[in-house]
Amino acid sequence: MYTQVRRNNMLSMLLLALFPLIILGTIWVFLALVNYFGTYYYDAAGNMVNVFNADIVNGYFLQTVPWVIGGVGLWFLIAYFSNTAMIRQATGARPLERRDNPRVYNIVENLCMTCGMDMPKVNVINDPQLNAFASGIDRNSYTVTVTTGLMDVLDDDELAGVIAHELTHIRNRDTRLLVVSIIFVGIISAIMSMTVNMMYHAMWFGGGGRSSRDDERGNGLSMMVVLVVGLICSVVAYFFTLLTRFAISRKREYMADAGGAELCGNPLALASALRKISGDPGLGHVDREDIAQMYIIHPKSLSQGFMNMVSSLFSTHPSTESRIRLLEQF
């Protein structure tokens, strides 16, 4: 477990260091393209020649660096410290106290006493589907969330196995790594949205009514710059999404299964719970990939077809069948 904790802490720091570098690199490329396509002259033969001035690009880049770092840092801090409220709002979760459901509360409390950890908050979602996940970044925000469907279908031993699995995620710092990756992907998504809006407005509202050859050519080059920037942002977003998926190793689910089985003392009960959950996983009213990464079973991991088989290569969850098989051999 300590190895897993160290690994997740290292990956969190790697993502924290790598993400600003990716953003700044993309901005430099953007400025370089604007400079190259926006600076040109016509030679003696009338051919247009583009000019790239590295000093000008670097000058503009150095001016934008503090603004970019400040903006991304502010966004990250807001999301980092409000992630619990955001997740609760997105899923419709509400706090669960002992008087609301002594059965669930006592299971969480007993498991925490067994492993000597502080008891996290317990949330419940009024949803008939079977689901559970852990979230949070520190002792004040660690939360275990379960659905009413899960509580109704699982018996006490199975429910204890599921909750032990989620507590292990907290103990292994998996939740912190997930929150960091979700925030970064959210920033990338926002940049993508702004890029799409730029492309839309440039295509439909830019450059009309010009008749001179130079103006038409310049307008065409401006459009090309926007399209190239859009392509670059798409590639960066795709690359970072893959990087995040690789960072959130499927090994964490196996580790949480093993830790949960050891904590509850009944691996067969956890295997039985996974089998039941696989029949109806997820949340019916929540269709967000960033939230689904936290589920005990990712709904898409159960889909069939070629595209889903390809997608499973980059999945954050291993197959449920392999998890059950290992638990039954525990």
Image (spheres, rainbow, N blue to C red):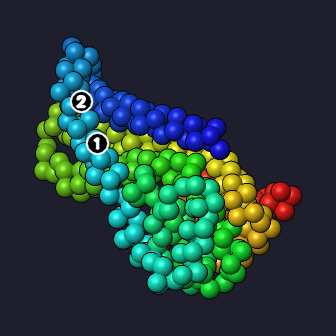
Q: Is residue 196 left or right of residue 93?
A: left
**Circle 2: residue type:** Val
Residue drawn at (28%, 42%) of the image: 72
Taking depth in this image into account, of 26 and 75 the one nearest to the observer is 75
Q: Position of residue 231 (x, y in %)?
A: 41, 42
Label 2 environment density (alpha carbons within 10 Å; few <14, some 14–19, many ≥20): some
Q: In the rendered structure, which disc, 1 or 2, sits on the residue that comes first in sequence?
A: 2
Residue drawn at (47%, 84%) of the image: 100
- Up the image or down, 8 lies above or below 150; here it is above
Q: Element at badge 2?
A: helix
Q: Which dot marks residue 260?
A: none
Residue drawn at (35%, 65%) of the image: 85
The residue under label 2 is 65
Q: Position of residue 313 (x, y in %)?
A: 68, 50
Q: Position of residue 297 (x, y in %)?
A: 64, 65
The residues bearing labels 1 and 2 have C-alpha atoms spaced at a distance of: 11 Å
Label 1 environment density (alpha carbons within 10 Å; few <14, some 14–19, many ≥20): some
* Residue 239 seen anywhere in this rendered image of the structure: no
Q: Are marks 1 and 2 in contact (CB under 8 Å)?
A: no
Taking depth in this image into account, of 325 and 231 the one nearest to the observer is 325
Q: Quadrant of residue 3?
A: top right
Please identify the quadrant where the C terminus is shown.
Answer: bottom right
Mark count: 2
Taking depth in this image into account, of 180 and 6 the one nearest to the observer is 6
**Circle 1: residue type:** Val
The residue under label 1 is 72
Q: Quadrant of residue 204?
A: bottom left
- Up the image or down, 120 lies above or below 213; here it is below
Please identify the quadrant where the N terminus is shown.
Answer: top right
